[in-house]
């Protein structure tokens, strides 16, 4: 989610204390800092875009990371304000957990259960920026003298909103299963919030012979922007590509991808496309691996929003 949403919900977390909203209240400072600080992993961009892609929504967005960040925040606030450091820790932790839950519910995924699990988890219910969430918590700010009731209403509204989004997604999944005759256990279906449009849902269908991606509108039940891609059977080149360091990194980044390969002037190219985020006629994220005639990897590139990033092939 965007930092503004995290900050406003952090204010809502602090408002549960029942104290008036104030920039000088250490409980609010703890809750807001907790709600924002997991995104400090943005500093990994100092080592390049690929480092950010590898680490974003990793440890700082996990249970272990929340505990560590909350300990740091509570220590900083204790040094500045004095008082009850354990109380600051709890409010910072509540703020950090709110950050993790919100990010879990969009389709990018977070390592929420680290260190218990290093797998990315995604709830696939919320857009990256959802104005409804901000609208639910704006009353908290305006009720700054007695914000607790507004905060309780806001969090109750979030639960109801998530339930409505879940029902919407389930209905889209049912429609797609019926429309495409999907067979349980044989065909894989993922439905995710589209990048734009509150009622639009992107989908990915992995059948036995082809992969279908497109966008479905919940209101008019129309499906658009469909692309049909052959599902490539395994080959020595594909197997080799998936075993390389760039291939393993890409598979950790997304579990919904399509592989295509071709040969040109004695060199072999493998392209892996992340099917979650469409960008105009192409996809937002993809990787290209280039092999020589001995099937040794020579070059690899990661494309992020039309920004080509060299990948370490070792």
Image (cartoon, helix red, strand yellow):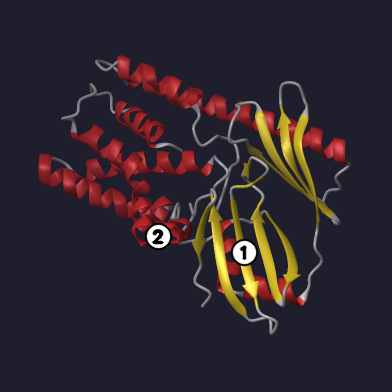
Q: Quadrant of residue 244?
A: bottom right
Which residue shows up at 81% across the image and 51% down it? 187
Residue 73 or 286: which is nearer the viewer? 286
How many residues crowd mark 2 within 10 Å: few (<14), some (14–19), many (20+)?
few
* Residue at the extreme right of the image, as rendered: 181
Which residue shows up at 57% across the image and 72% down it? 299
Percent coordinates x, y for residue 224 in the rendering = 76, 33
Q: Earlier in the sequence, mark 1 or mark 2?
A: 2
Marks 1 and 2, Cα distance to the nearest angstrom? 18 Å
Give residue 48's mark: 2
Residue of label 1: 288
Percent coordinates x, y for residue 189 in the rendering = 75, 46
Visible in this render: residue 7? yes
Judge left or right: residue 73 versus residue 173: left
Q: Is residue 95 above or below residue 112?
A: above
Percent coordinates x, y for residue 123 in the rendering = 58, 42
* Residue at the extreme front of the image, as rendered: 265
Which residue shows up at 41% across the image and 57% down it? 59
Dot 2: what SS? loop
């Amino acid at each position: 989610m965007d930092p503004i949403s995290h900050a406003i919900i952090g204010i809502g977390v602090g408002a549960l204390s029942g104290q008036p909203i104030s920039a000088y209240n250490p409980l609010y400072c703890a809750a807001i800092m907790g709600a924002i600080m997991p995104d400090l992993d943005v500093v990994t961009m100092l080592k390049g875009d690929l480092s950010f892609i590898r680490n974003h929504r990793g440890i700082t967005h996990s249970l272990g990371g929340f505990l560590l960040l909350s300990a740091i925040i509570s220590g900083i606030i204790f040094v500045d304000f004095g008082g009850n450091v354990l109380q600051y820790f709890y409010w910072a932790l509540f703020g950090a957990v709110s950050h993790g839950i919100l990010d879990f519910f969009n389709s990018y995924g977070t390592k929420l259960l680290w260190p218990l699990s290093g797998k990315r988890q995604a709830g696939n219910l919320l857009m990256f920026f959802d104005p409804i969430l901000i609208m639910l918590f704006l009353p908290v700010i305006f009720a700054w003298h007695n914000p607790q009731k507004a905060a309780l209403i806001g969090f109750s509204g979030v639960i109801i909103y998530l339930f409505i989004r879940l029902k919407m997604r389930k209905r889209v999944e049912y429609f797609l299963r019926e429309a495409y005759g999907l067979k349980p256990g044989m065909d894989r279906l993922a439905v995710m919030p589209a990048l734009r449009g509150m009622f639009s849902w992107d989908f990915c269908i992995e059948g036995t012979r082809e992969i279908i991606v497109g966008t479905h509108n919940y209101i008019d039940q129309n499906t658009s922007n469909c692309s049909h891609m052959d599902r490539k059977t395994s080959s020595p080149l594909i197997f080799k590509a998936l075993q390389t360091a760039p291939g393993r990194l890409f598979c950790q980044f997304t579990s919904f991808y399509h592989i295509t390969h071709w040969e040109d002037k004695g060199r072999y190219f493998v392209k892996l496309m992340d099917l979650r985020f469409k960008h105009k006629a192409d996809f937002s994220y993809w990787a290209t691996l280039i092999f020589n005639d001995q099937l040794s990897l020579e070059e690899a590139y990661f494309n992020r929003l039309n920004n080509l990033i060299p990948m370490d092939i070792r």
